[in-house]
Image (cartoon, rainbow, N blue to C red):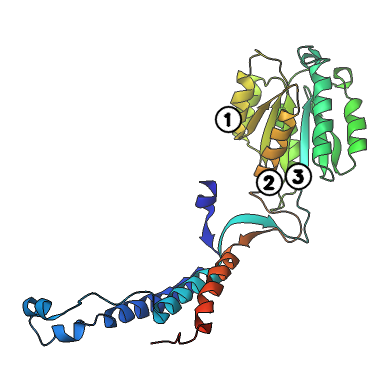
Amino acid sequence: MQDLAAFHFIRPLWLLALLPALGLFLLQHYRSDAAERWRRVIDPELLKYLLINGERGSLVTPNGLLLLAWGLAAVAIAGPTWRLEASPFADNKPPVMVVLKVTDSMRAGDLAPTRLDRARQKLSDLLAAREGAATGLIAYAGSAHMVLPPTSDKDVLLTMAGALSPGIMPLDGDALSTAIAMADGLLPQDDQGGTILVLTDTVAADQIAELSARRPRHDAAILGLLGQDQDMSSLQEAARVLGADIIPTTVDQSDVEAIDSAIDRLQNTAAVAGEGRFWQEAGYWLVFPLLLLALGWFRRGWVLT
């Protein structure tokens, strides 16, 4: 259904070429009626008894197939499409800004060894899955701080993430809205895309209100760092306000795969750096039936009538 909703023509004006094709088809079909000339001079009630075969001629004629080829060619040139593709001259992995909560609550052991350690492990797995993609890092508690701008050096980012702890944060609390606003400002401000990935366990009620008041320009996803049977209502509310995907933490790699898939899906709606994204033409598939129709003109005696 998503592909169907995105279906359109790159050069729709070429579809106007279907109008003369349709007109010629109707004219040819009308002329193929052998009884049409007699209907003008003989009463229809009498004519039906005089005709041996009043059926119209076969539609499978050289003229009919030529008009079919005409229609297929017009649709192919119009450029039917429903998928985006990245320019071969562009970086097809827009940056991701990771927003990591670093508070005492992240020391909880329901995700062994701690929620914070599990967040770092998942970040490492995600960077491995998105090899070469630029990733930045923001740490927050009661205040938000840029740790690293978007970089493709995953070793440096993981080293910086490993040095974070609640003890070095200047203020206790929850400044998620400030951190997201900072991440939003560090991502490209044109149509190059980019995603905000939030790694957190809970979201304070006042932060949900602030997020609702100033939603970021870029899309977001949330990895919920909570153990099983933990209350995720605040994360769900934050995800609703941000229009973000929320992925619960799992013991295997399925959460990382889900995050990677969500980031790719979100970034597919935006242009990439350089030449941007282009609609992938599907009209070339119509070349094959056109070639089959063209083979008829190599058949002995196959001429236009």
The image shows residue 186, relative to residue 20, as above or below, that is: above
Mark 2 secondary-structure assignment: helix
The residue that mark 2 highlights is 267
- Sort mark 3 into few (<14), some (14-19) or many (20+) by Cα contacts within 10 Å: many
Mark 1 secondary-structure assignment: helix
Question: Which of the two discs, 2 and 1, labels the residue nearer the N terminus?
Answer: 1
Question: Which of the two discs, 1 and 3, labels the residue nearer the N terminus?
Answer: 3
- Sort mark 2 into few (<14), some (14-19) or many (20+) by Cα contacts within 10 Å: many
Front disc: 2 or 3: 2
Front disc: 1 or 3: 1
In front here: 180 or 300? 300
The residue that mark 3 highlights is 187
Residue 81 x %, y %: 57, 60
Q: CA distance from mark 2 to mark 1?
A: 19 Å
Describe residue 304's horizontal placement relative to residue 42 as left or right: right
Q: Are marks 2 and 3 in contact (CB under 8 Å)?
A: no
Question: Which of the two discs, 2 and 3, labels the residue nearer the N terminus?
Answer: 3
- Report the residue at 11% width, 88% height from top: 41
The image shows residue 173, relative to residue 242, as above or below, that is: above
Residue 276 x %, y %: 70, 58
Q: Which amino acid type corresponds to the residue marked 2 in the rendered image?
A: Gln
Determine if residue 221 is in view.
yes
Q: CA distance from mark 1 to mark 3?
A: 22 Å
Q: Which amino acid type corresponds to the residue marked 3 in the rendered image?
A: Leu
Q: Are marks 1 and 3 in contact (CB under 8 Å)?
A: no
Determine if residue 11 is in view.
no
Residue 51 x %, y %: 15, 80
The residue that mark 1 highlights is 240
- Sort mark 1 into few (<14), some (14-19) or many (20+) by Cα contacts within 10 Å: some
Give the image quarter of residue 88: bottom right
